[in-house]
Amino acid sequence: MPYDDSVPPTRRARPLLVAAALAALCLTAVVGCGGAQDPAGTDTGAAKPGPEAEATASASTSPSAIPTESRPSGATPTAPLPQGPLTGRTVVIDPGHNPRNREHTEEINQQVDIGTGRKECDTTGTSTDAGYAEARFTLDVSHRLRELLRAQGARVVLTHDDDRPFGPCIDERARIGNEAKADAVVSVHADGSAVGNRGFHVILPAAVKGGGADTSKIVKSSADLGARIAGHFVRTTGSAPSNYIGGGTGLDTRGDLGGLNLSTVPKVFVECGNMRDPKDAALLTDAGWRQKAAQGMADGIAAYLKG
């Protein structure tokens, strides 16, 4: 089955909240940075290589209900964490999609409850024209981000680590963050839009309430988290905010994503760039740029947690 390359519906971020937060973070005019292309997505850094689905189906048919592989990854570091500015804090990293989702299309196409409706358990994600899969990109960046946060003393949990046949479904991804009582959750993605559409954007949860969804307690904190990540991401990577979503702010608010709707803790999605644009793809496939992307996210998360 081909990758899901559909473009998510564009929604405008809250202008006053966004403008104030980004102004404070000096999100000024930037120039996109270049990088040597690594078409195969081969890792040359420390981490190994590796748009969203959703929530609760019945126990007998739920694609989320798979055995021990469904346990969150990275919950217990093999060595004691160093003491640092994030000691005592828990961060959940959600690598978007799964490299083997495309081998389990029947399972990931099953509908799950996202509170305000139903959506597919998960999707395959997109890829570059050269075949570097979004799911591999998200795992690589998530590994890098995990190490940066652990170095500051944070407890880091991954929703999966290439250790299960598919998924997890989007409802389970939200549940992992909720059950970890995470101080922040970041879902790592890359977009699959048209050529010429460039830049990153951070997706914030809209105010939604229905069924098992109620974001009223996390809208403000998630917006703060997202604005801080956007500000640090642009400074660290040199990439400009999206030129096709968010009105130049780098922020977009959506109410149709189960991973956000079902979250009870501060959570955002980071779309690091557009895999279908050759210039963005050259960045996303470069290991050095991926390290910068992870650093930008780590700095934004740390700034949010430090207050």
Image: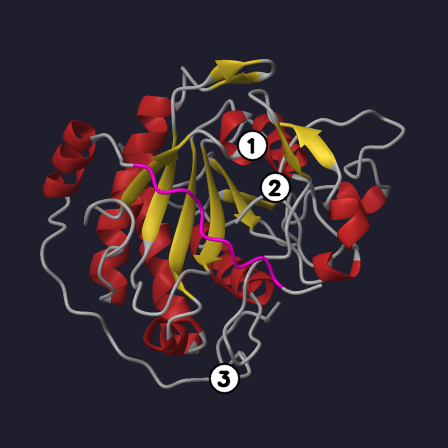
SS at mark 3 in the image:
loop
Please tell me which of labels 2 and 1 falls first in the chain: 2
Q: Position of residue 76 (x, y in %)?
A: 66, 45
The reply to whether dot 2 and dot 1 touch (C-beta < 8 Å) is: yes
SS at mark 1 in the image:
helix
Q: Quadrant of the C terminus?
A: top left
Up/down of 35 relative to 54, above or below: below
Q: Is residue 5 part of the magenta span, yes or no?
A: yes
Task: Decide: few, some or many residues near mark 3? Use Cα within 10 Å; few <14, some 14-19, many ≥20.
Answer: some
Up/down of 85 relative to 99, above or below: above
Q: Position of residue 272 (x, y in %)?
A: 39, 58
Task: Decide: few, some or many residues near mark 1? Use Cα within 10 Å; few <14, some 14-19, many ≥20.
Answer: many
* Residue 53, disc: 2
Q: Is residue 55 left or right of residue 84?
A: right
Point 14% across, 36% down: residue: 19
Using the numbered discs, state the Cα–Cα distance from disc 3 to disc 1 in whole angstroms. Answer: 32 Å
Using the numbered discs, state the Cα–Cα distance from disc 2 to disc 1 in whole angstroms. Answer: 7 Å
* Residue 258, disc: 1
Please tell me which of labels 2 and 3 falls first in the chain: 3
| Of marks 2 and 3, the one in the foreground | 2
Task: Decide: few, some or many residues near mark 2? Use Cα within 10 Å; few <14, some 14-19, many ≥20.
Answer: many
